[in-house]
Image (cartoon, rainbow, N blue to C red):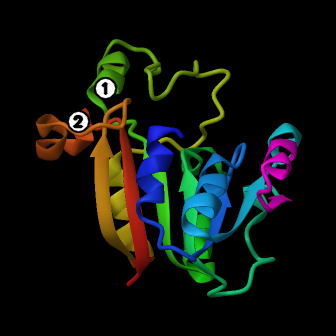
Amino acid sequence: MRADLDVIAGLINPGARVLDLGCGEGELLAHLQETKSVNGYGLDVDENNIRICLDKGVNVIEQDLDDGLENFESHSFDMVVMTETLQSVKAPDRLLLDMLRIGQECVVTFPNFGHWRCRTQLVLGHMPIANHLPHAWYDTPNIHLCTFRDFEKLCTELDLKIIQRRVVNHKHAENPWMLRWPNMFGTFAFYRLGRA
């Protein structure tokens, strides 16, 4: 399993009700069903991903996150997960509020636009391309790139509680530089959020 998904799996309690937004091929949910007996659903728009999820026995719904989550009742999940998708949705603020309307907690991961490599390329007059942001400006799915500080400011504005933050490099490992200066040296962040 991908290293980032392994980190998230460690945050999920056995038997939890889990919703995975942008679930891809259902790798996380399949693992959680097998190892923690979760009751999970995934949302995705890619037909191939949906077929692979179904082949794995993962419950999946075809749904565009930009359409919102109004079809889910409030407090219907223990955990809502969204990995590396926040930066590609049209209204990340509304989606975060919706995630915590339907879930007790949520986990959000995203790439850091404030990483030193991105900053250096901007100073040189170019849109950044890095391991964690591999697309050129003209073909990127990312429409709302942010830094860790930007995200934490948004959480404050939305009155969301940051329960836990973990900052990692592109191999999903930690180092002392990231602990001291996360916004400069962190590549990805995992935020576990709850209602204030």
Q: Position of residue 163 (x, y in %)?
A: 32, 72
Lower sequence index among marks 2 and 1:
1
| Nearest to the observer: residue 147 or residue 131 | 131
Q: Position of residue 194 (x, y in %)?
A: 42, 77
Residue displayed at 31% across by 32% down: 115
Q: Amino acid at mark 2?
A: Met
| Quarter of the image with the C terminus in it | bottom left
On the picture, is 147 further left or further right than 84? Answer: left
Q: Which residue is mark 2?
A: 184
Question: Looking at the rendering, in which quadrant would you find the N terminus?
Answer: top right
Q: Between label 2 and label 1, give the one nearer the viewer.
A: 2
Residue 57 horizontal/vertical position (percent)? 80, 56
Name the element at disc 2: helix
Q: Secondary structure at mark 1?
A: helix
Which is more toward the observer, 12 or 148?
A: 12
Please report the residue visible at 61 percent of the width from the left and 70 percent of the height from the top: 37
Residue range highlighted in magenta: 51-62
How busy is the neighbourhood of tag 2: few (under 14 within 10 Å), some, or many (20 plus)?
Answer: some
Q: Quick check: 133 left or right of 175? A: right
Q: Which residue is mark 1?
A: 119
